[in-house]
Amino acid sequence: MKTYYQHIHLYKFACEVFKKIGCPEDHAEQAADVLINADLRGIDSHGMARLAGYVKQWEMKRLNAQPNIKVVHETPSTAVVDGDGGLGLVVASKAMEIAMEKSHKVGTGWVAVKNSGHFGIAGYHAMMPLRYDMIGMTLTNASSLVTPTFSLDKLLGTNPIAVAIPAENYPPFVADFATSAVAYGKMQILQRQEKEAPLGLVQNEQGEASHNPHEPKIGGALLPLGSDREHSSHKGYALGAIVDILSGVLSGANYGPWVPPFATAGKTQERTPPVGEGTGHFVGAMRIDAFRPASEFKQHMDQWIETFKQAKAIDGQEVLIPGEPERNAHLERLITGIPLLPAVEESLAQLAQQFEIEKPAPRAQSGVEA
Amino acid sequence: MKTYYQHIHLYKFACEVFKKIGCPEDHAEQAADVLINADLRGIDSHGMARLAGYVKQWEMKRLNAQPNIKVVHETPSTAVVDGDGGLGLVVASKAMEIAMEKSHKVGTGWVAVKNSGHFGIAGYHAMMPLRYDMIGMTLTNASSLVTPTFSLDKLLGTNPIAVAIPAENYPPFVADFATSAVAYGKMQILQRQEKEAPLGLVQNEQGEASHNPHEPKIGGALLPLGSDREHSSHKGYALGAIVDILSGVLSGANYGPWVPPFATAGKTQERTPPVGEGTGHFVGAMRIDAFRPASEFKQHMDQWIETFKQAKAIDGQEVLIPGEPERNAHLERLITGIPLLPAVEESLAQLAQQFEIEKPAPRAQSGVEA
């Protein structure tokens, strides 16, 4: 049973909370905007459900609410940003702004980020350049839950990749996905429902295929995209590794099993001493007219999208364009409001009490989840 | 039963053949070098086995042996290269040289290529920047063999991604993989052996899981990395789509089902009229010291590699670094020579006859395949 909230009420509440922990107003607004966009796009695991986690990080003195985010090295098309231990939600957006400026000047901009934290949904930052007719790309490493092919040790995070590409009349192409076979959130849903997972998503402590969604907590692990060697899990492993190296090794952040855990996760131990500073990201922006006229490109993107949407589909199915399900959720939730689970409502009520602010009020009339 | 050949003999033979179809000497050497490196790295499907295919393209007047490869648009960090219908093997290498020059000047260089053809193994071009302490990246689209998730139509090629990253004392990290669940070459091997494929690699004409490795030729298709929706084939589809858009739409080449087939493949019909020129690639080079000192980065790469190599492995298995199997093949084949199947030997003998040149002689003493 979920209760629905108008997104603007949740956004304002998150803003208040971020201000209460000491964030400057613009940072609080930025951070709240990333969270509410996750909820709007239907990625519930990365929205208001995480707000208490950021507060917990602050309580654990792992979060600098007033970071001095700065460029520590740069060339015309690159920069390294030191996030000063700030909210990844804010740091990644600043980094993307720098990438966009560089793209404006020399065609493309690529920014590696160290000393940051969990940045929310990768797609949010990747979509920022769209309005300027730029392609956006965002990568981040994360605390280790995933095994390389044939490994018993968890050495990689779910290390997502997001790429956003504008079209003319169609909505943009927005891919945003973990490089593991599934995101951990999918296992958490099965855990709550006390259901089994299909084989190929997790392995047990001995590295055997398992149906148990609890595996990552009891010595097992998430598997890389591809699931097993026969179905090319070495490709998912390679992808997760590329994300880790560009985000962590290139920036001077931690990498592999050293990436610090998100506060609420508590699923992995931090390895010490660290091999770098905080969590790492890698973001890029490419001006389309650095390659061909943007109008020409976007017309061809329309044709690309149309061709794929019109593909003959398997009975009862539909061929979707990356980003389409999230966009549909967005359009729907602007109207219905955002459904929150009781546990999430409870966490918001606790935050309201802790900071002596009003908790968000549900919609007078509850929506019905589609 | 395979016969072994010294790689230098095969290289010289390929050079001669490329010169006979009219390639300038430097192009012939470049093209032969890409092919022989595929064979050395153990990627037999992309080496001498393809030589006759390039000749067939030339015979079909689909290959310009003396292309005027030129930059048609550029910014400080980007360029679009028109391959003038030349050998992809040559065009992609020239494009990477341009990317490397731009990287040298402004930190990174990104080159989209149109009007090109099959460029051999993606990893070859991605590895070119390694010697200059740069990260290399190569993408290409290809004729359509792969279905998007839930589609019956084949709309994407096996669209590979290659990323090469230098280390200090360890060999480089080199990922090079098709974004389909498996490369088509794997199905061809099973076809020859009259063996069944594991479920999750191909679908039949109705979009159902199939064991038949012949499916892509009889109305079925290769599946994207991830295999099915439950195991996140939408991620493999998104990856293949990103490769297609950056290689084809951004450059002005063909994309999706319009990408022209490689001559020998004959597996797909070319859609007309075309939506762009030839096949497209996208290559990039990033100077490491545009982010952090190269020596520092490479020492951390050593630590990254060591950490992954030392992971506790599943019984009887070993955790490998991307590029390790290919490098091991390379070291071995420099000594044993390169094993060729009778059908490949036969195709070389025919080329020798056609162009009145000497066919390569096998090693006096045959090696034994490991």
Image (spheres, coloured by chain):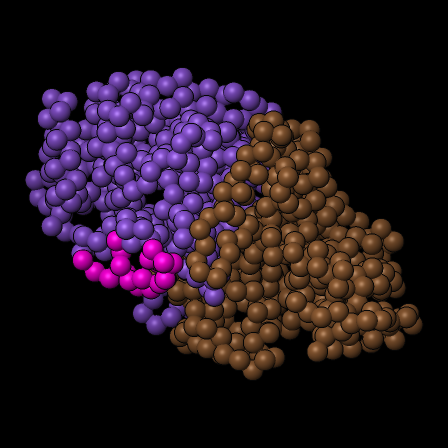
Chain colours: A brown, B purple
Instruction: Examine the rendering and report whether any part of residue B235 can be seen.
Output: no
Q: Nearer the viewer, residue A69 or A182?
A: A182
Q: Nearer the viewer, residue A85 or B114?
A: B114
Give yes or no for residue B212 being in the magenta stretch: yes
Residue farthest toward the bottom in the current orientation of the protein = A194
User: What residue is rendered at 88% in x and 75% in y?
Assistant: A353
Residue A287 pos. (x, y %): 63, 33
The quarter in which the C terminus of chain B is drawn is: bottom left
Q: Is residue A91 left or right of residue B350?
A: right
Give yes or no for residue A348 being in the magenta stretch: no
Residue B294 pos. (x, y %): 55, 41
Quarter of the image for residue A160 reads bottom right
Residue B111 pos. (x, y %): 51, 30
Q: How many marks?
A: 0
Q: Which residues are magenta?
A: B194-214
Q: Is residue A368 left or right of residue B9?
A: right
Query: Relative to A45, does residue B6 appear above or below in the rendering?
Result: above
Instruction: Examine the rendering and report whether any part of residue A210 can be seen.
Output: yes
- Provide the major secondary structure of the magenta segment: loop
Q: Nearer the viewer, residue B125 or B194?
A: B194
Query: Relative to B193, does residue A297 appear above or below in the rendering?
Result: above
User: What residue is rendered at 24% in x and 21% in y?
Assistant: B21
User: What residue is rendered at 14% in x and 42% in y?
Assistant: B343
Q: Is residue B246 left or right of residue A272?
A: left
Query: Relative to B199, does residue B255 appear above or below in the rendering?
Result: above
Residue A10 pos. (x, y %): 81, 64
Quarter of the image for residue A2 reads bottom right
User: What residue is rendered at 33% in x and 57% in y?
Assistant: B204
